[in-house]
Amino acid sequence: MRVEHLILGPNDWVPNNPLIAIRIYHGVRLANGAAPDAAAFERLFAAHGWPPDWRGGVYDYHHYHSSAHETLGVYAGTARLVLGGPGGTEVTLAAGDALLLPAGTGHCCIHADAGFRVAAAYPSGQHWDVLRDAPDADALARIRNLPGPQNDPVTGRPF
């Protein structure tokens, strides 16, 4: 597995999170060498304190969460996402990849094949929102004051 780290500062109207790095996990594999399916990603995340929440795609508009960090495990298909807001960093994800998005991090799906699906999870006790506009003072305070994750959702190592 190869892990990329990106730190993004504010961009356009998207606050991003200059304190916690985005993590892109390429090629997550199970003990038997297989790429995880949805249930395997959910078990992996849950074992590290990130209970699974939903399965589906990624919105095709720029948005961020002010009240939760998010992890996505790609269990089918491929997609290109923009991270960080309009004009941000493009990443390509495929089945077996995962993504950790710190609170405030803009993300948007710009292209996905018909089979693209993710399993999503959030740290225990955090509940996500969806914001599509510049943050007000309350949203900025939520992002700034939200505790960092205790453990990495994929490796389980302390954050």
Image (cartoon, rainbow, N blue to C red):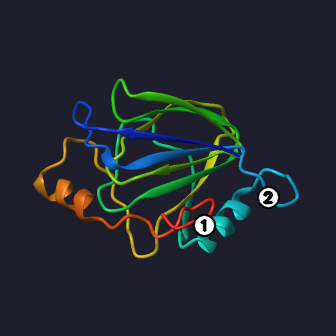
Q: Residue furthest right?
A: 32
Q: Residues within 10 Å of mark 2 (few under 14, many from 20)?
A: some
Q: Give the image quarter of residue 2.
A: top right
Task: Check disc 1 and report its element: helix, strand or loop.
Answer: loop
Residue name at image x 31 percent, y 43 percent: 16
Position of residue 61 in the picture relative to residue 158 (left or right): left
Name the residue type under label 1: Gly
Q: Give the image quarter of residue 112.
A: top right
Which residue is tagged 2? Answer: 30
Image spot of residue 159 (x, y percent): 48, 63
Q: Residues within 10 Å of mark 1 (few under 14, many from 20)?
A: some
Q: Earlier in the sequence, mark 2 or mark 1?
A: 2
Residue name at image x 45 percent, y 42 percent: 59
Name the residue type under label 2: Leu
- Mark 2 or 1: the one toward you: 1
Residue name at image x 25 percent, y 37 percent: 10
Image spot of residue 40 (x, y percent): 73, 63
Image spot of residue 67 (x, y percent): 31, 62
Image spot of residue 106 (x, y percent): 36, 41
Picture layout, residue 112 above or below residue 17? above
Q: Give the image quarter of residue 39.
A: bottom right
Task: Check disc 2 and report its element: helix, strand or loop.
Answer: loop
Position of residue 147 in the picture relative to residue 74 (left or right): left
Which residue is tagged 1? Answer: 156
Picture layout, residue 34 above or below residue 13? below
Q: CB under 8 Å between callouts 2 and 1?
A: no
